[in-house]
Amino acid sequence: MTGTNGPSALFSPPAVRGLTLRNRIMVSPMCQYSATDGMANDWHVVHLGAFAVGGAALVVAEATAVEARGRISPLDLGIWSDAHIAPLMRLVGIVERNGAVPGIQLAHAGRKASTKLPWVAGPRALGPGDGGWAAVAPSPIPFGPGFEPPRELTIGEIGEIAEIVDAWRAAARRARLAGFRVIEIHAGHGYLLHEFFSPVANERSDRFGGSFDDRVRIGLEVVAAIRSEWSPELPLFMRLSATDWIDDRPSSRAHRRTTWE
Ligand SMILES: Cc1cc2nc3c(=O)[nH]c(=O)nc-3n(C[C@H](O)[C@H](O)[C@H](O)COP(=O)(O)O)c2cc1C
């Protein structure tokens, strides 16, 4: 396709590692809040398939939870068991048959887990009496009003952080078996990895908190874990937020913590 300034770069095929995309249009992941027990269904097939039919080059499935307690809501897509693989293969199939590359965003909601569906009125947090569950995070700081303080993840003998890194590894293996060709790590939007990265949510004093290098350690471990299951020929993206959505006036507590670094 050409424009007044010559051929449009939008329709030139970019190469990312061993993949060549048919153009530069990528469909961002979009939560559908339509899964049962994390299983993909007809809704997801139609939703993602339509983008491939429409001509996008890379279609990325929504935030897909690497463990059940990492879901934003009870209706999130999941990839925490081998039983999730077959339904995900249907998404891969519809996208590939229509000329696009199937990607998947792997996610853990951290302290923003266990919330109501976005269109349900009232407080966001989903209490245990309403089918909610206990959230985990780097530090026991609630996301906001109405949220219970999350439980701080341990690194002692139980090694909960190592278990979570392993959950990302297992999810990458399942994504590979399902046939996805791009993985995007969700490390933005205030979810678990972003919580570790940010001094607003991470007040740990062990090797997963404190300095910038320590706060991002879990992200690097997740990348290494996924890469151990993911072909070097295939892209691995990481979605980052460049803001903490906080009041950054000098008088605010969060601002002081950030600028001390
Ligand atoms: C319904 C909906 C669901 C979304 N779900 C996700 C998600 O699962 N993961 C994510 O990283 N971003 C999610 N987003 C953000 C989008 O990926 C995208 O970044 C955002 O819509 C801004 O792009 P736009 O200006 O093209 O809409 C969602 C957005 C919408 C509208």
Image (cartoon, rainbow, N blue to C red):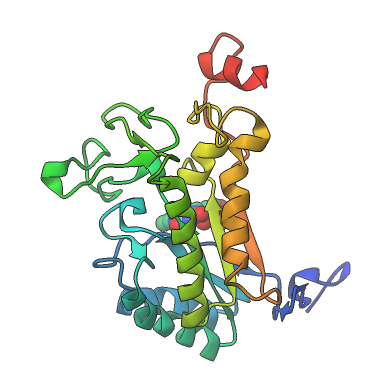
Q: Residue at x 46, y 67 (%)?
A: 170
Q: Residue at x 46, y 86 (%)?
A: 94
Give x and y (percent) for residue 169: 50, 64
Is residue 35 shown above or below 217?
Answer: below
Is residue 208 shown above or below 246?
Answer: below
Q: Residue at x 46, y 81 (%)?
A: 178
Front-most of residues 135 and 13:
135
Residue extending furthest toward the front: 157
All told, the count of numbered labels is 0
Give x and y (percent) for residue 144: 35, 29
Is residue 31 shown above or below 179?
Answer: above
Could one spot residue 27 in this view of the protein? no
Residue extending furthest toward the top: 251
Is residue 105 shown above or below 189?
Answer: below
Left or right of 214? Residue 3 is: right
Left or right of 98? Residue 9 is: right
Front-most of residues 257 and 10:
257
Residue extending furthest toward the left: 129
Instruction: Name the quarter where the N terminus is drawn.
Output: bottom right
Could one spot residue 154 in this view of the protein? yes
Give x and y (percent) for residue 139: 42, 31
Front-most of residues 226 and 28:
226
Give x and y (percent) for residue 7: 85, 74
Give the quarter of the image for residue 236: bottom right
Front-most of residues 13 and 223:
223
Left or right of 180? Residue 235 is: right
Q: Residue at x 56, y 46 (%)?
A: 218
